[in-house]
Amino acid sequence: MNIEHTFLQRAKEIEQVMIKHRRTLHENPELSFEEHETSLYIRNALKDLNIDFKVMGETGVVATVGKGSRCVALRADIDALPMSEETDLPFASTKQGVMHACGHDAHTAMLLGAAQILKENETSLNGTVKLIFQPGEEKVPGGASILIKEGVLNDPAPEVIFGQHVNPDAPAGIASFVAGNMMASADELYWTICGRGAHAAQPQKGSDPIVAASALIMHLQTLISRQRDPLSPGVLSVTAIHGGTVTNIIPEEVILKGTLRSYDNDWREETLEKIQEHSEMIARLHGCGCDFKPLRGYPPLINDTAATHFAKSSAIELLGENSVTDFEPKMWGEDFAFYAQQIPACFWMLGVRPLDKDEMPGLHNPKFTPDESAFAVGCALMASAAANYLSDTAVNPATLAPANKEVLKEMEIEG
């Protein structure tokens, strides 16, 4: 029996262990950079497995299995979202206004499962697997950037890093991959438009920030429709407007919030500069001032081509071709992108939609409930990708095992 089938069988055997991990974490969610109980839970689980670890970024946990000069990293995020749960699950969040609505509880549970399998097979590993339980994925500046600054990619230095994310758009157990652009940069945009208040019946005595804000919102769309190459994806959305309180008073100020998404860093920077310049000009046309403050978020997530081909071929060996598909890039943001800027990386999606349903509540939805039957697949995907990478027949993505080269040749033809 090959390593893939051994790992998948073992993952199914410890499925209930992972489900217990996930449900405990789901019941006790914590916000970004506040994951103290979550971190303690992970550390205790690793202690039970006799796996060495250290704390990074205050609440992050970084563990290692195996030994040797070669190293591969696996990453899971551990934080929850600031939203109230509406699932009625028996293990629903006990914390008002905090919920694991993005599946990070599942990510953590699956990586703990992979840790157990890798530990059980430690003597056969041809190197070290670094397990990164990362805080703060949901909040800028992103826990990945903090851990990188603290040296998470050093001592030992991974040659490649793999990560996965649950996907409510695909059936449970389906793995989806894409090389190159996968997710966009994600910048937060904040405007304060300052006018001069007046009676609504005497607008000439004031400077109306609502009119200025309205003109600005409409103009901003031209940065997408008329000042961007149509073949280069980009999104600029104004998502919040706050101003005024009653019907007969022109307010002093209006607050706008929004987001900018792109795969092109050059266009991203140029557009942020244009937003600054155009916002000030349009506000001035209406006798108002404008304070624009962008908060630069995550860079685009760009999967390394060779690493993605390797991970996809490993998944095909594990699951069969019918359970491995192509992923359509999204304009979502993901701080795994910071790792991908530093070393070869592959981030894939794992289907968690119940097989008897055509659709389910999506990510960041208060009713989001992933199908736990996918956990064994996700666990085995992580463990086998790491072990295969370190194996003698799969030295690195550039020199893949002969058994995988035909698969890659087919993928190159299809791509």
Image (tube, rainbow, N blue to C red):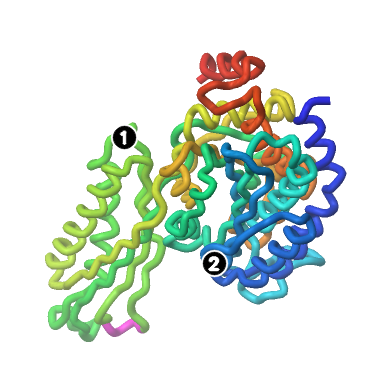
Q: Classify residue 229 as left or right of residue 238.
A: left
Q: Mark 2 points at which residue?
A: 32
Residue visible at 72% across and 46% down in the picture: 114
Q: Mark 1 points at which residue?
A: 230
Q: Nearer the viewer, mark 2 or mark 1?
A: 2
Q: Where is residue 154 in the image (x, y as percent from the top left)?
A: 49, 49
Q: Where is residue 232 in the image (x, y as percent from the top left)?
A: 34, 35
Please tell me in which quadrant of the rendered image residue 292 appears. bottom left
Residue visible at 51% across and 44% down in the picture: 157
Task: Report if residue 195 is visible in the image.
Answer: yes
Dominant secondary structure of the magenta stretch? loop
Of helix, strand and loop, which one carries label 2?
Answer: loop
Quadrant for the N terminus, please.
top right
Please tell me in which quadrant of the rendered image residue 300 appears. top left
The residue segment tinted magenta is: 246-250
Please tell me in which quadrant of the rendered image residue 184 appears. top left
Of helix, strand and loop, which one carries label 1?
Answer: loop
The amino acid type, in three-letter code, at marker 2 is Ser
- In the image as oriented, which residue stretches furthest toward the front? 68
Picture layout, residue 210 above or below residue 131: below
